Image: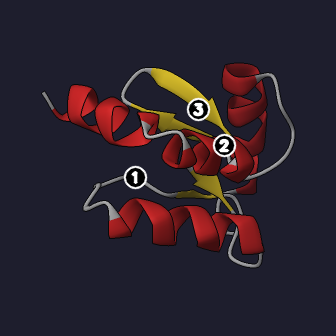
Amino acid sequence: MYSTMVCPYCIRAKRLLKSKGATFTDINLSSQPQRRVEMMQKSGRQTVPQIWVGDTHVGGFDDLWALDRTGKLDKLLENAAA
């Protein structure tokens, strides 16, 4: 996950993933701003958070939350952990 320290959506995404027991790597663009270009190249987006589950680019918090609401996030997390 690419995030910043002050982004409320980043905080929500981390909270949701932690509530699912998911482990993740947080690439904090506040302390590593040079990695923003990397994020944009990988995701095609400029906003944070940008979230991957395994090799699957989920998108931002709204996308992550939508997966959770439809019951698809648990399966995605399970497949990534396998």
Q: Provide the secondary structure element on which disc 1 rests.
A: loop
Residue 20 appears at what percent x and percent y? 31, 60
Give the label, 2 or 1, closer to the camera.
Answer: 2
Front residue of 40 and 48: 48
Residue 79 appears at what percent x and percent y? 24, 26
* Relative horizontal placement of residue 49, taking residue 73 as reference (left or right): right
The part of the image, by quadrant, that contains residue 6 is: bottom right
Give the label, 1 or 3, closer to the camera.
Answer: 3
Give the label, 3 or 2, closer to the camera.
Answer: 3
Residue at position x 50%, y 35% in the image:
52
* Relative horizontal placement of residue 39, taking residue 28 as reference (left or right): right
Front residue of 31 and 39: 39
The part of the image, by quadrant, that contains residue 42 is: top right
Report how far apart the C-alphas of labels 2 and 1 lie in the structure: 12 Å
Can you tell which mark lies on residue 57? none
- Marks 3/2 in contact by CB < 8 Å: the verdict is no
Amino acid under label 3? Val
Figure disc tally: 3
Query: Nearer the N terminus, badge 1 or badge 3?
Result: 1
- Marks 1/3 in contact by CB < 8 Å: the verdict is no
Residue labelled with disc 1: 25
Amino acid under label 2? Gln
Query: Nearer the N terminus, badge 3 or badge 2?
Result: 2
Q: Provide the secondary structure element on which disc 2 rests.
A: loop
* 41 vs 51: above or below: above
Report how far apart the C-alphas of labels 1 and 3 lie in the structure: 15 Å
Can you tell which mark lies on residue 58? 3
Residue labelled with disc 2: 50
Residue at position x 87%, y 39% in the image:
46
